[in-house]
Amino acid sequence: MTETMKIGRDSVVSFHYRLGKEGEAHFEDSHTGDPVLYLHGHRSMLVGLEEALEGRVAGDSFTATLPPEKAYGKRKEGAQQRVPRKHVLTKGKLKAGQVVQINTAEGGREAQIIKVGLKNVDIDSNHPLAGMTLDFDLEVIEVRAATAEEIAHGHAHGVGGHQH
Ligand code: ZN
């Protein structure tokens, strides 16, 4: 007889989700691909999702509403700047609202385009979901104990997680 495993520290969890802005239609759905796989309790997942998933078991379906501080953070002032087009690493035609990779002194990072000019692009380096309260519909697919190797690496191994 196997005991149903509850999600806790060092659980490897796979789950599906649908994500939307609070009270609005979902704009992201993991069901189009593999479930997300992560190692619980190692800060590799949004803090609000870890809190909502703690103690749950495979087969549980529920909704969690995450304020910005438990999801992608508050929007930061001064995150908007004008950069030369050549610093945009993403290829192809650029348009407002698009999330692109920008080359910075600290390496590549994501930013959202506000406006495209002839030589320059106005960007906002806030995460596109920063400042938003988010609704997650969650479905726990599988819960298992992490291997010693996964705990040492600080992440889960397998489809949807790290594969190396
Ligand atoms: Zn690893």
Image (cartoon, grey):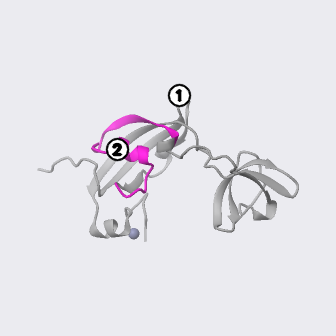
* Residue farthest along the front direction in this orientation: 77
Residue 94 or residue 53, whichever sits in front: 53
Height in image: 104 above or below 132?
Answer: below
Tell me the number on the disc at residue 4. none
Q: Residue at x 53, y 46 (%)?
A: 72
Residue 67 or residue 164, whichever sits in front: 67
20 relative position to 106: left or right: left
Q: Where in the image, quadrant-wise, is ligand 1 located?
A: bottom left
Callout 2–callout 1 Cβ contact below 8 Å? no
Give percent across and percent down for residue 30.
Answer: 48, 46
What is the quadrant of the C terminus in the image?
bottom left
Give the residues in magenta: 41-68
Would you call the spot at circle 1 few (<14 residues within 10 Å), some (14-19), or many (20 or more)? few
Instruction: Kindly state the secondary structure of the residue where label 2 is placed.
Output: helix
The disc, 2 or 1, on the residue closer to the chain's N-terminal end is 1
Q: Residue at x 30, y 41 (%)?
A: 59
Q: CA distance from mark 2 to mark 1?
A: 21 Å
Give percent across and percent down for residue 24.
Answer: 56, 29
Instruction: Kindly state the secondary structure of the residue where label 1 is placed.
Output: loop
128 relative position to 13: left or right: right
Residue identifier under label 2: 53
Give percent across and percent down for residue 154.
Answer: 37, 65
Task: Say whether residue 8 is magenta.
Answer: no
Label 1 CB sits under 8 Å from any ligand 1 atom: no
* Residue farthest along the top direction in this orientation: 23
